[in-house]
């Protein structure tokens, strides 16, 4: 799949609308369209990377930024009692959208596991 056709590349470019939470030069965060928890958002790199399996050591800083942003936004959005960070990777990992994304889930339980 080319970046032109990638759903999350289109969301990062603003070509498909989303409920944006955060954006900088490298990252974009937006609410999941089908939330599994009271707070459920996604963090993606603007650059197309298919999955965590396709990252290299050169992506370490980017991956660190994604985790730091997960923490910051989760706390900003009120997940004071904890939150869950998930990266589904590849077919056996249950990944449906082939553009690297971090799920962040939180808010009062009960909620179904993503
Ligand atoms: P995966 O299973 O690939 O880890 O998760 C993909 C996530 O993207 C799912 O939780 C799904 O609800 C979400 N998603 C799929 N299409 C869209 C969309 O067009 N907009 C938004 N905001 N989320 C989407
Ligand atoms: Zn993409």
Image (cartoon, rainbow, N blue to C red):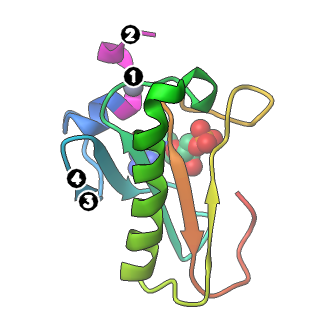
Of marks 1 and 3, which one's residue comes earlier in the chain? 1
Q: Position of residue 14 (x, y in %)?
A: 19, 39
From the viewer's perspective, tell me whether residue 94 is left or right of residue 37. right
Q: Residue at x 41, y 42 (%)?
A: 61
- Mark 4 highlights which residue? 23
Of marks 2 and 4, which one's residue comes earlier in the chain? 2
Residue 32 showing in the rendered view = no
Which dot, 1 or 3, sits closer to the camera?
Answer: 3
Query: Do labels 2 and 3 touch, CB within 8 Å?
Result: no
Mark 3 Cβ inside 8 Å of ligand 1? no
Q: Position of residue 16 (x, y in %)?
A: 26, 37
Confirm whether the magenta stretch covers residue 104.
Answer: no
Start-end of magenta stretch: 1-8
Q: Secondary structure at mark 4?
A: strand
Q: Secondary structure at mark 3?
A: strand
Q: Residue at x 46, y 10 (%)?
A: 1
Q: Secondary structure at mark 1?
A: loop
Of marks 2 and 3, which one's residue comes earlier in the chain? 2
Confirm whether the magenta stretch covers residue 2.
Answer: yes
Magenta region's main secondary structure? helix
Which dot, 4 or 1, sits closer to the camera?
Answer: 4
Of marks 4 and 1, which one's residue comes earlier in the chain? 1
* Tag of residue 2: 2
- Dot 1 alpha-carbon crowd within 10 angstroms: few under 14, some 14 to 19, many 20 or more: some
- Mark 3 highlights which residue? 22
- Dot 3 alpha-carbon crowd within 10 angstroms: few under 14, some 14 to 19, many 20 or more: few
Q: Nearer the viewer, residue 100 or 13?
A: 100
- Mark 1 highlights which residue? 6
């Amino acid at each position: 799949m080319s970046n032109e056709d990638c759903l999350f590349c289109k969301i990062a470019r603003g070509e498909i609308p989303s409920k944006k939470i955060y954006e900088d030069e490298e990252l974009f965060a937006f609410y999941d369209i089908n939330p599994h928890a009271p707070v459920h958002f996604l963090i993606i790199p603007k650059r197309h990377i298919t999955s965590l399996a396709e990252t290299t050591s050169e992506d370490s800083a980017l991956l660190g930024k994604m985790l730091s942003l997960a923490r910051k936004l989760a706390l900003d959005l009120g997940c004071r009692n904890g939150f869950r960070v998930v990266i589904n990777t590849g077919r056996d990992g249950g990944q449906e959208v082939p553009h690297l994304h971090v799920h962040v889930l939180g808010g009062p339980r009960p909620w179904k596991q993503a």
